[in-house]
Image: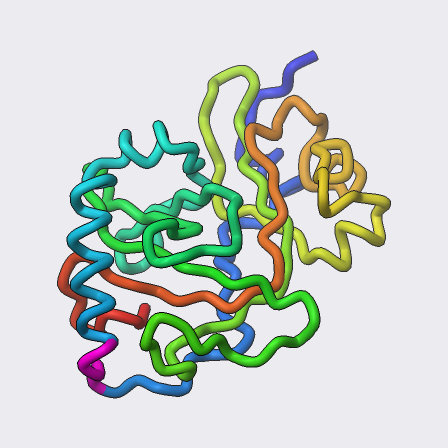
């Protein structure tokens, strides 16, 4: 039996949208250096040429996993967590599908220090601890619930695999009533993350 995604079910089964915030914040909030300015300009020109609209990201294999955050950004990930300047791990778009910015990630499985890459001050990077993201889809109405996640340790404790996360584990943990509620699921591994705004942002090119 397919159960509609009612408010009661939401209260019973889902952790409401709590964005996974940085576990180690950036330490450099100052003006961009010449090398950083060059990097941002290069990224901006490249991504606006290749991924100006959300449809371009979808065609390239990026998958939506968040709602709009407090900046209006909606995030899409390609699940390729070792990024380079032309291959961001995430792209984000506004409600109209226009590119806002990107995340460039470097895995941190063993406590590696802040990256020294691309002429970027290491203090610009944020660190996120590993968690499993999933998107809930009401099998009856088709409505989507984003920003759902489970810490890696909790997922593994429930018998889940991080290399091949299963909807069955989300059911076992009690977040959804059945596996057919899960539209997308993937591990977001522990990583260093560089935020780069493509459109002008009052807080600066590398900040929320």
Q: Is residue 169 magenta?
A: no
- Left or right of 164 on screen, residue 48: left
Q: Residue 12 occupies which quadrant of the picture? A: top right
- Pinpoint residue 152: horizontal percent, then vertical percent: 71, 56
Above or below 183: residue 187:
below
Report the front residue among 87 and 204: 87
- What residue lies at 33% left-to-right and 52% top-to-bottom? 86
- Pinpoint residue 160: horizontal percent, then vertical percent: 80, 44
- What residue lies at 26% left-to-right and 52% top-to-bottom? 72
Q: Which residues are magenta?
A: 31-35
Q: Residue 98 occupies which quadrant of the picture? A: top left
The N terminus - image quarter: top right
The kind of secondary structure the magenta stretch mainly shows is: loop
- Pinpoint residue 89: horizontal percent, then vertical percent: 44, 51
Report the front residue among 14 and 65: 65
- Left or right of 97 on screen, residue 8: right
- What residue lies at 54% left-to-right and 37% top-to-bottom? 135
- Left or right of 163 on screen, residue 125: left
């Amino acid at each position: 039996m397919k159960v509609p995604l009612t408010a009661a079910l939401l209260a019973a089964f889902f952790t409401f949208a709590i964005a996974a915030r940085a576990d180690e914040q950036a330490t450099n909030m100052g003006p961009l250096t010449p090398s950083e300015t060059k990097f941002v300009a290069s990224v901006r020109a490249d991504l606006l040429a290749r991924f100006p609209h959300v449809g371009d990201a979808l065609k390239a294999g990026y998958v939506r996993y968040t709602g709009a955050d407090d900046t209006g950004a909606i995030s899409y990930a390609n699940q390729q967590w070792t990024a380079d300047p032309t291959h961001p791990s995430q792209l984000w778009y506004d409600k109209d599908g226009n590119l806002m910015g990107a995340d460039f990630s470097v895995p941190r499985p063993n406590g590696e220090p802040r990256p020294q890459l691309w002429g970027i001050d290491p203090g610009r990077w944020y660190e996120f601890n590993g968690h499993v993201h999933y998107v809930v889809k009401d099998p009856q109405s088709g409505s989507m619930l984003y920003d759902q996640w489970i810490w890696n340790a909790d997922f593994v404790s429930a018998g889940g695999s991080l290399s091949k996360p299963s909807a069955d584990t989300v059911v076992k943990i009690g977040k959804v009533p059945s596996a057919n509620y899960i539209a997308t699921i993937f591990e977001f591994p522990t990583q260093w993350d560089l935020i780069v705004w493509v459109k002008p942002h009052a807080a600066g090119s590398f900040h929320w």
